[in-house]
Image: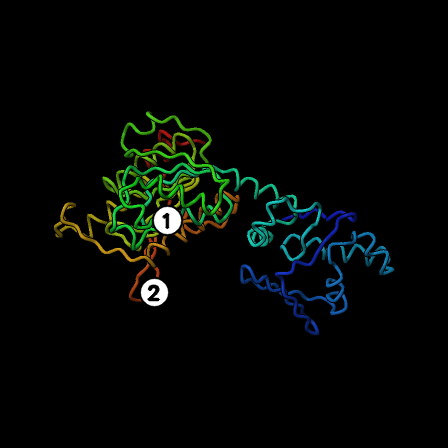
Amino acid sequence: MLIVKLVEKNSILKLRPSVAVVIHEEVTEFFLSNIRKSIHLKINPELSRLLFELTGNISIQNFFEGKGLNNKQQDKLLQLLTYLNSVHILLNEDCPYDEDYKNYPRIFSLLEDFYSSKSEINTVFRKIKNSRVMIVGLGAVGTWVTQSLLMDGVQNFILIDPDKVEISNLHRQIGFTEKSIGTFKVDAFSEYLRIKDNDVNITKIKDWLDETFFEKYQFSNIDLIINCADFPTVDKTSLLIGEYCMQKGIPHIIGGGYNLHQSLIGQVVIPNKTACVECFREKLEEINRIDTANIRKMEHKNRKIGSFPPLSALSASITANESFKILANLENIVMNNNRTEFHIRTLNFSNIEIKRSTTCKWCGNEGKYYQL
């Protein structure tokens, strides 16, 4: 049984502006518009109407005294207020919002659906802002993901891509113009990001991700790595990133949306909590042995796979959404243990669930990176 500590009577609570309240004769409905969630409670209509008076400018104790409530009535109402605060209908105004609220009011509003007080939200947003995210590959997905995270408040990036901008990049990759052609992607894209936010901190690396990469560059304080690279293959880069992250305990995401999977939405890996890249490799290898036993694979040099900007943006947006959840310490990460594809003709999603293998050589119970 979940035990919720009663809010203090000196607390200042506020009915959140993004919550709609519909009072019926026997039931009151609270609709959390940000997350499209309804909560129905059997509450006396008069009691429900009192909630509209919680505007964030009076303590619970003064509110009780102003209504002339006896101790029994106060205890009953305090239990209700505690519950409504715990389900994010009421917000504890225990401090003002930080200055960042001016630039990101709607991000703060979203976080109110997951945290109960302004002090908690300030702490979480500072974590998001100070997080350091590595993006490997600035293509159709990598550029979209990076811009989305910048707009979410992330201020520190490591951008990795040795390529130069080509004219064929312009139709699906953001941040580049005809003037960018022939310049390094990390240079052109960094300039684009600084136009949007001059305070962003960017480390640029013009190098291929290979077996020596993480030895060559000694990184520290990385909070998340997102793989959006497909050279030499996405499988190769995912294994290199996956093993490094398992060693360091870094969450990482296979960004998807490229090569033979233009609509792929890749998996989230939380070391020792979810299936790792090696778990996925083993399972997908097993599936592919069955499905492609008599199929000749396309040669890489002859491969001409389509790329469609809306699909790249869709894959990148879901990846950025899951990234935000990781950085904000939110628990409802959908892409844990999942590999998903979006079908352009039907607008449907298909999903492969792959759970952590207890025999995996990386994260299994006897795996070399397993930690209790």
- Badge 2: residue crowd in 10 Å (few <14, some 14–19, many ≥20): few
Q: Are marks 2 and 1 in contact (CB under 8 Å)?
A: no
The colour scheme applied to this rendered structure is rainbow
340 on left or right of 116:
left
Percent across and percent down for residue 312 are 33, 54
First in sequence: mark 2 or mark 1? 1
Percent across and percent down for residue 294 are 12, 52
232 on left or right of 354:
left
Residue 108 in view, yes or no: yes
Percent across and percent down for residue 279 are 32, 41
Q: Secondary structure at mark 1?
A: loop
Q: In this orientation, which residue lies closer to the viewer: 77 or 33?
A: 33
Quadrant assignment, res 268: top left
Residue at figure coordinates x 28%, y 34% from the top left: 208
Q: In this orientation, which residue lies closer to the viewer: 75 or 236?
A: 236
The residue that disc 1 covers is 175
Q: CA distance from mark 2 to mark 1?
A: 27 Å
Q: Secondary structure at mark 2?
A: loop
Residue 1 in view, yes or no: no
**Which residue ends up furthest to the front in the rendered image?**
179
Residue at figure coordinates x 49%, y 38% from the top left: 131
Residue at figure coordinates x 29%, y 55% from the top left: 171
The amino acid type found where label 2 is placed reads Leu
The amino acid type found where label 1 is placed reads Gly
Percent across and percent down for residue 99 are 62, 44
The residue that disc 2 covers is 347
Q: In this orientation, which residue lies closer to the viewer: 92 or 201?
A: 201
276 on left or right of 292:
right
Front of the two marks 2 and 1: 1
Q: How many marks?
A: 2
Q: In this orientation, which residue lies closer to the viewer: 77 or 120?
A: 120
